[in-house]
Amino acid sequence: MKQRINLLISFSVIALIVLMTVQCYLVKTAYEYKVAQFHTEIKNEIASITNNYSDIDSVFISRKEALYKKLSETYLKENKDKSQIRKSIVENQFRNDVTQKIKLKFERELPNLKIDFAIVLNKFILYKNAQQSDTIFSEKPFIQNKLYGNLSSLNQAFLVRNYVGTTNAKLAGQDYRLLTEDSMYVSVVDWEMIILRRMTFILILSLLSILTLISLFVIAIKALIKQKKVNEVKTDFINNITHELKTPLTTLGISTKILERKDIRENEENFNAVVKTISRQNSRLQSLIDQVMANSLAENQIELHKEKVNATTFLSQIIEDFKVAYPNIAIETDFGTQNTSLTLDQFHLTTALLNVLENAVKYGSDKITIKTRLHQNQFSVSIEDNGIGIAKNKQALLFEKFYRVEQGNLHNTKGLGLGLYYVNQIIKAHQGSIAVISDLGKGAAFTIVLNV
């Protein structure tokens, strides 16, 4: 049974991990789709407002073309170094003005987004007589080739669009053509938060799904463990009740056979002794049955017949009855509540207190001290013994139904594990509380608190 439960738990954990992994994968896929969708939206919006440089500054177009033409002629005529031409293009005199105009256009057309951008020059190629003459620029986009914009790096930016331009001219009687390619890269500030806000519903739904799966898993495992515990308790209870019933039934069987003997029936003294034995065992059987039935009730189902009693008188009667059954047990009292009256059910509370006293004897005590105190309209009775004590990790289980401390007992009386459960139910029914303080080898102290 234990192996099957462990196997089931293992499979459940694996299934939960697989489901969570699938859920995380779906969320990641949705995130990547949202990112791609966001980039497409930004591209389309920016493309619609920056079709060409001409819609930003038409004068700039003619100046730029003039600059490129002049630099090309200078390069061809004077055979200047490519790096000088490159530097002249990148550090053009229009860069700050164009950057500011593009920035203002973004702020005006896309007020809900904070956009950083950079326009970099990818190609600057001269063709002569339809043949490639020279390449000044032809490389992957580098931020060092930035013409306009405020981006300091292209790492977090994405390509929006390319600008391709051609210029035809004649130099020294020969035709040449200039091909240029500019690329715009943009980076939306806090774009991750924008994506996450768009995914709020998906994230909440996924989180709730995962939490629900985990909760259901925990509930199922708890129910499984509880069921296993119930099965163990049931088996233990059956074994204990069988043991408890066996002794009186065996005695009754033997007594019945004795009564069949003629010499016993003719001897009145022996006959009465056997009858009394049968009566006692019958009472014991009835007591066991009553105990099981009584402990099947919760505290709110117990019917109490309360009456007003003197606390000291009530406890003294219980102690006297206990001494009759256990004459070898030393009882000390310290009553600090001489004239206190309590409203309680004498029968049930007497049984509860006797159960605590009998438990003390059952677990090795030969001396019991009973103390009473009154504090702020609360009456407390403490029962302290010098028995074997109770381990700290088992004290929380003492009042559970069918639970028995595993050290065994010193009087070979197994019990049903219902005594302290019954005590707890009776005290709760009286709107009171019970607590225990104990250490192994140092006895135990049970304190019952009732409202006056």
Image (cartoon, rainbow, N blue to C red):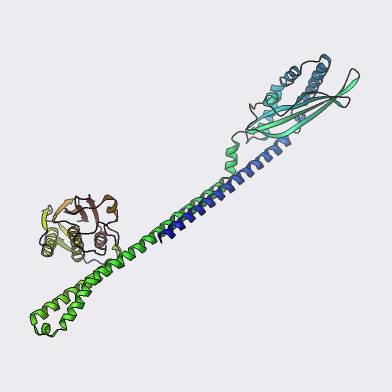
Residue at position x 24%, y 66% from top? 304
Image check: 286 left or right of 84? Answer: left
Residue at position x 66%, y 41% from top? 36
User: Which quadrant of the structure image shows residue 64?
Assistant: top right
Q: Position of residue 199 (x, y in %)?
A: 58, 45
Task: Please state which of residues 33 and 125 is positioned toward the viewer in this rendering.
Answer: 125
Residue 296: tell me if it is visible: no
Image check: 349 left or right of 31? Answer: left
Q: Position of residue 436 (x, y in %)?
A: 23, 53
Image check: 252 left or right of 313? Answer: right
Total tally of numbered discs in the picture? 0
In which quadrant will I find the C terminus? bottom left
Residue at position x 74%, y 18% from top? 83
Residue 210: tell me if it is visible: yes
Task: Please state which of residues 154 and 132 is positioned toward the viewer in this rendering.
Answer: 132
Against 107, is 348 above or below?
Answer: below
In which quadrant will I find the N terminus? bottom left
Image check: 56 left or right of 280? Answer: right
User: Which quadrant of the structure image shows residue 62?
Assistant: top right
Q: Position of residue 441 (x, y in %)?
A: 20, 50
